[in-house]
Image (cartoon, rainbow, N blue to C red):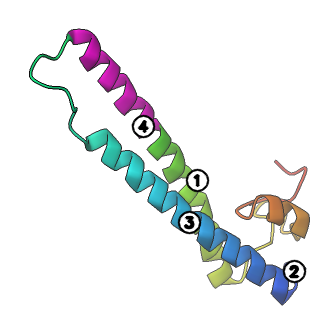
């Protein structure tokens, strides 16, 4: 089955995905750079400061991991454009409604199939 999206809808959704892809790449790079940045502390670093910095790094890396997972979904959706399968449920083969794709452009299934 093919999607029931108009060329205008497809163009809008592709632009949304490309914008999201670029935004996620930028955010992920910023988080990873922040996690890798050396501490601004001087020579007298206390154990509590080290633990706090380690916690901050773990949180930042966790954000980068989340962004990477979301980025992979967006890239998958963009690949579906290339294959001509964008807007088609991977589970049932039914067309995914525009409203769902407008809300979540990387949706893999139609509403109620999850």
The residue shown at (19%, 26%) is 41
Between circles 3 and 2, the one closer to the viewer is 3
Residue 106 on the magenta segment? no
The residue shown at (87%, 85%) is 6
Nearest the viewer among 34 and 42 is 42
Disc on the earlier residue, 3 or 4: 3
Label 2 Cα crowd, 10 Å radius (few <14 / some 14-19 / many 20+): some
Provide the residue designation for mark 4: 60
Disc on the earlier residue, 2 or 4: 2
Q: Is residue 53 left or right of residue 97?
A: left
Mark 3 and 4 residues: CB-CB less than 8 Å, in contact? no
Mark 3 and 2 residues: CB-CB less than 8 Å, in contact? no
Disc on the earlier residue, 4 or 1: 4
Provide the residue designation for mark 2: 5
Mark pair 4, 1: CA separation: 15 Å
Q: Is residue 38 left or right of residue 7?
A: left
Q: Is residue 69 left or right of residue 46?
A: right
Between circles 4 and 1, the one closer to the viewer is 4
- Choose top left, top right, bottom left or bottom right for residue 56: top left
Mark 1 and 3 residues: CB-CB less than 8 Å, in contact? no
For the residue labelled by badge 3, is the local secondary structure a helix, a strand or a loop? helix
Mark pair 1, 3: CA separation: 9 Å
Which contiguous range is marked in magenta?
47-62
């Amino acid at each position: 089955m093919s999607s029931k999206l108009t060329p205008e809808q497809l163009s809008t959704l592709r632009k949304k995905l490309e914008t999201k892809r670029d935004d996620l790449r930028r955010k992920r790079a910023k988080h990873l750079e922040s996690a890798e940045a050396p501490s601004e502390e001087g020579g007298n670093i206390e154990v509590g400061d080290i633990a706090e910095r380690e916690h901050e790094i773990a949180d930042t890396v966790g954000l980068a991991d989340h962004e990477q997972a979301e980025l992979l979904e967006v890239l998958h959706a963009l690949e579906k454009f290339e294959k001509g399968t964008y807007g088609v449920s991977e589970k049932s083969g039914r067309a995914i409604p525009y409203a769902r794709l407008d809300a979540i452009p990387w949706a893999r299934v139609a509403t109620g199939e999850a």
